[in-house]
Amino acid sequence: MKYLEDNYISIVAVVHNNENIIEKKINELLNILKENFKHYELILVDNKSADKSLEIIKKMPANFTYIELPVNHDTQSALAAGVNIAIGDYLVEIEDISIDMDYNLIMDMYRKCQEGNDFVFLTPQNTSFLSKLFYKVLNSSLTNFFKADIGSSLMTLSSRRGQNKTADIGRKLVNRNVSYVLSGLKYAYISCDINYRNTRSFGQNFQLMMQTLLYYTDIATRACQNISLFFLAVSVFFIFYSIYARFVGHPVEGWASTVIIISIGFAGVFLIMGMIIRYLDNILKNTSDSKPYIYRNIEKKQF
């Protein structure tokens, strides 16, 4: 008889318009769980499918929990809707159930987690140029306060301690994988030979990238402050230039004093803008704790 793991494991998978493969994927995931764990749960999050995916899920004679979202959420929020009701000692997150991969890799990730890693990421060997560029910018921006090597992931496996530590930090999980790495706990990667292209639209990818950079790095704040300082310097220059022109040159009467007043005013405005930008950045990162999802229905199927 095959030895079964005593640890309770939860798998959370997001479903969106997968009617052609959903039954096959559910059976594959349940088989992996049954063959390796005594205690387990599968949580499917239907992200407002427009096809028959949810109908198929409801009719399947199998043991799992499904969540019905009333509107289409971004994938990070859809994952959060499932993760926040999971009770496992270990948690597997699958952002896109349509990806063709070997779910036996879950056990490789589980064993890697048992070695002391609170987070294990399954990463594809080949990703898009845009994805590589984004993570290069992200990692270089994080080096100022945290050395990280974050990349695309197909699945993430985390321990309950890792989930609790991430929750204790109290920050909104704009990008779950980045939040996990920045928790400070040990993490590892497992690479797989898959040419990965996510199913998100360009607009969705761009929004996630921008939100990640804004929330986890100070790249936008530094850019705004540098622009403010540049115009502050320009204003100061015109102040001195006006004084110089007043006593050395032959300006139009009243020109020098007018420019000095305007320059001082703009210098103050740009200085205040830089301070406000930093203040708003701190507010954003410390008060964004609202739930990013809403439920329509949660049902646990028992057969």
Image: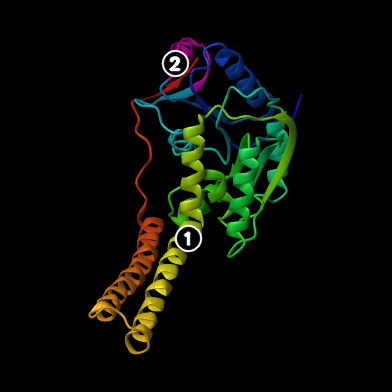
Q: Which image quarter holds the N terminus?
A: top right
The quarter of the displayed image where residue 42 is located: top right
Residue 263 image-quadrant placement = bottom left
Instruction: Find numbered disc 1 in the image and state the secondary structure of the residue it sits on.
Output: helix
Q: Which mark is residue 17?
A: none
Q: Is residue 55 visible?
A: yes
Give me the residue at 36% from left, 65% from top.
279
Residue 225 x %, y %: 43, 65
How many other residues sit within 10 Å of disc 2, few (<14), some (14-19) or many (≥20)?
Answer: many
Which marked residue is nearer to the observer: mark 1 or mark 2? Answer: 1
Q: Earlier in the sequence, mark 1 or mark 2?
A: 2
Left or right of residue 7: residue 193: right
Q: Which mark is residue 54?
A: 2
> Residue 37: x and y, percent?
65, 30
Q: Which residue is mark 1?
A: 223
Dot 2: element: helix
Front one among 92 and 269: 269
Residue appearing at x 62%, y 29% in the figure: 197
Residue 126 sits above or below residue 280 on the image: above
**Does 253 sit above or below residue 75?**
below
Q: Residue at x 41, y 57 (%)?
A: 285
**Rendering coords of residue 67 (x, y %):** 42, 26
| Disc 1/disc 2 C-alpha distance (Å) | 45 Å
Residue shown at the point (35%, 60%) measured from the top left: 280
Is residue 116 on the magenta stretch? no
Q: Amino acid at mark 2?
A: Leu
Name, please, the residue furthest toward the left: 254
What amino acid does circle 1 point to? Ala
Q: Position of residue 144 (x, y in %)?
A: 59, 65
In the rendered structure, which segment of residues is drawn in magenta? Answer: 49-64
